[in-house]
């Protein structure tokens, strides 16, 4: 996925606003030239306010998904942070991803003493594949 540096900064900034709890949100994308391009980031509320897991209220998730489709975009990614570890999907993430085939999982890792690290994955049938996330100007 291509993502404007400003949008990627928004995702990382969201994670840094509450480094003690996982944060979450959605990324809307458009398809162009065979590659997805991020169009907008939508913040969501983690109903658990927990450092160990995240969940978006089903109504909020539906409302955000509808908004994305109304704009003519697709849900391209769900993002969240890991407050104590590297950005790699947990078993909870793998389980949650089963309901969202084809959607990327952008994870911001906030391991102690390190700069935020961002990685993206496709999770299909329990298989985890890292995919590129490319920050671009504009």
Image (cartoon, rainbow, N blue to C red):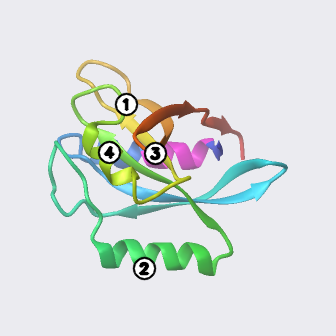
**What span is colored magenta in the figure?**
5-11
How many angstroms separate mark 2 from mark 1 (CA)?
Answer: 27 Å
**Residue under pointer 2:** 63
Which residue is located at x 51 percent, y 79 percent?
66
In this orientation, which residue lies closer to the viewer: 58 or 14?
58
Question: Which of the marked residues, 3 or 4, is nearer the chain's N terminus?
Answer: 4
Against 90, residue 53 (above or below) is below
User: Is label 4 in a helix, a strand or a loop?
Assistant: helix
Q: Is residue 30 left or right of residue 44?
A: right
Question: Which of the marked residues, 3 or 2, is nearer the chain's N terminus?
Answer: 2
Which residue is located at x 32 percent, y 42 percent?
81
Tag on residue 87? 1
Mark 2 Cα-neighbour bin, 10 Å: few <14, some 14–19, many ≥20: few
Which residue is located at x 36 percent, y 47 percent?
80
Front of the two marks 3 and 2: 3
Question: Which of the marked residues, 2 or 4, is nearer the chain's N terminus?
Answer: 2
User: Is label 2 in a helix, a strand or a loop?
Assistant: helix
**Residue under pointer 3:** 105
Residue 14 x %, y %: 37, 49
Front of the two marks 1 and 4: 4
User: Is label 3 in a helix, a strand or a loop?
Assistant: strand
């Amino acid at each position: 996925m291509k993502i404007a540096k400003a949008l990627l900064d928004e995702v990382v900034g969201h994670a840094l606003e509450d480094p003690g709890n996982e944060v979450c949100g959605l990324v809307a994308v458009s398809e162009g030239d065979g590659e997805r391009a991020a169009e907008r980031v939508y913040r969501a509320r983690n109903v658990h306010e927990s450092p160990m897991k995240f969940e978006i209220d089903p109504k909020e998730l539906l409302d955000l998904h509808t908004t994305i489709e109304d704009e003519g975009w697709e849900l391209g990614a769900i993002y969240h942070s890991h407050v104590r570890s590297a950005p790699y999907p947990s078993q909870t993430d793998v389980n949650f991803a089963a309901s969202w085939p084809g959607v990327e999982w952008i994870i911001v890792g906030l391991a102690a003493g390190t700069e935020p690290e961002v990685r993206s994955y496709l999770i299909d049938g329990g298989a985890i594949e890292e995919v590129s996330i490319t920050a671009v100007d504009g």
